[in-house]
Amino acid sequence: MHIEPGLVSPEKMLLAYATAAAAGAMTVKFALDSIRERGVVSLAARAVLASAAVFTFFEVFPHYPVGVSEVHLILGSTLLLIFGAAPAAIGLAVGLLIQGLFFAPFDLPQYFANVTTLVAPLVAIKFLADRIVRPDTAYVDLRYSQALALSATYQGGVVLWVAFWALYGQGVGADNLTSVATFGGAYMLVVLAEPLIDLAVLAGAKLVRGLGKTGLVTSRLYA
């Protein structure tokens, strides 16, 4: 999880319900687009795969407490490029929920803040991808600069949301500001790794183009 217990008081957490609802509304919009494009079975299959990936990111990959939160290797841009926006958003929400229900129940009160923190930046990079990747360019042909832009935007969005919740919940005291800055500096190191991971995954996908016919990946991966 990204929002630590007690960082935002219960009465202030009401705002998280609204922000999570907005992120959820965009997810529904992306899901409807995906169903029209590839059908509900493809959407469901990709969402399951994305959920499993997110759970792995949180529980299997290394993660370290830094400042106001923890640093995780959450490959938001990778999820988007492989599975598409709706499955990636659903996967982030479901993966967080599974973690909270079975492994970290003390994090459940922060669930909606955490969903906002991870899904809102995903919505941002979906629109960014539509802008910087030509419609006739498959994701497997992405350039490093494009992968870097997507990764930096996603990870930067996560840092900004964590900073917002920390300042909203605990104020602008010197200790809190220092903790936020420490977390932000450590988290942005992920930007050094994620574009390379994206390009490696996309290079692997190039070798198995038959995946495009299975419905298990977004159609933009190859088309």
Image (cartoon, helix red, strand yellow):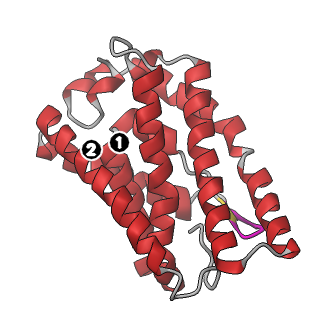
Residue 96 image position (x, y, % from top left): 44, 67
SS at circle 2: helix
Q: What element carries label 1?
A: helix
Residue type, label 1: Ala
* Residue that numbered label 1 is attached to: 85
Q: Picture quarter containing residue 134?
A: top left
- Relative image position of residue 130 (x, y in whole percent): 39, 27
Q: Tell me where residue 169 appears, x and y as whole percent.
A: 64, 78
Q: In this view, does 138 lie to the left or right of 144?
A: left
Instruction: Name the residue at 39% across, 35% down.
Output: 82
Q: Are marks 1 and 2 in contact (CB under 8 Å)?
A: yes
Q: Which residue lies furthest to the top in this view?
A: 136
Number of the label disc, if any, that sits on residue 30 = 2
* Span shown in magenta: 63-69
The residue located at (59%, 29%) in the rendering is 149
24 shown above or below 174: above
